[in-house]
Image (cartoon, rainbow, N blue to C red):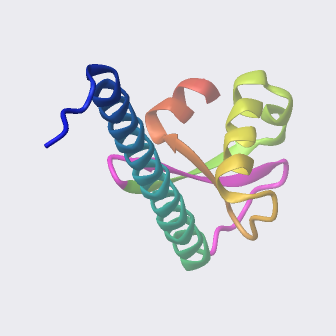
Amino acid sequence: MQMKSSKHMDQAKTKKRHNCSIGVKNTMEQLQEQLLKWRTREYKRISSTYDFGTVKGHFSVLALSNGETQIFLVALRYLSHPPFIKLLEAAEQEFGFNQKGVLVIPCEASELKRILS
């Protein structure tokens, strides 16, 4: 029976920890991808369910409020408002640039109200 050196055992432990951290990282990435796909499907389902009339000089935006959707009519002037531009960029990153119908943004309704006030 041959004893492994302390150095060899330390290397094996380090390799095992490294493999474990890679596994955790891969699992987290997969969960994030699944969540993003689910949220995208859910937003598409929600936005296609509603038919929003608009008022001249405004556009419709759908935001979440405690897991429920809330509809906003937003004046066109907010398209140059920096905090609103950040929301548009977040929507593009999360849902893509080709949203059809109402614009869905990944934002709580309370936050959107704050930005629009």
Instruction: Quadrant for residue 84, please give it.
Output: top right
Please give the count of numbered marks on the rendered protein.
Answer: 0
Q: Position of residue 40 (x, y in %)?
A: 57, 64
Extreme residue in the left direction:
1
Taking the spot 50% from the left edge, 30% from the top edge, the residue there is 111
- The quarter of the picture where the N terminus appears is top left
Q: Which quadrant would the C terminus be assigned to in this image?
A: top right
Q: Nearer the viewer, residue 41 or 54?
A: 41
Q: Toward the viewer: 16 or 81?
A: 16
Which residue is depicted at the point 61% across and 77% down?
48
Q: Look at the picture and state if 98 lies above or below 88.
A: below
- The relative height of residue 18 versus residue 38 in the rendered view (above or below) is above
Q: Could you say which is closer to the camera, residue 24 or residue 9?
A: 9
In the rendered view, would you say 4 is above or below 39? above
Q: Where is residue 7 drawn, in percent x and y?
A: 34, 21
Q: Does the magenta stretch include residue 57?
A: yes
- Compared across the picture, whether 23 is left or right of 41 comes to left
Residue at 33%, 40% in the rendered image? 16
- In the image, the segment drawn in magenta is 51-67
- Work out whether residue 77 or residue 9 is closer to the camera in this orientation and state it: 9
| Residue 40 forms part of the magenta stretch | no
Residue 34 x %, y %: 47, 63
In the picture shown, does residue 27 fall above or below 41?
above
Q: Is residue 117 left or right of residue 34?
A: right
Name the residue rendered at 68%, 63% in the picture. Answer: 102
Q: What x and y, as percent, mark residue 95?
A: 67, 58
Is residue 22 rendered to the left or right of residue 112?
Answer: left
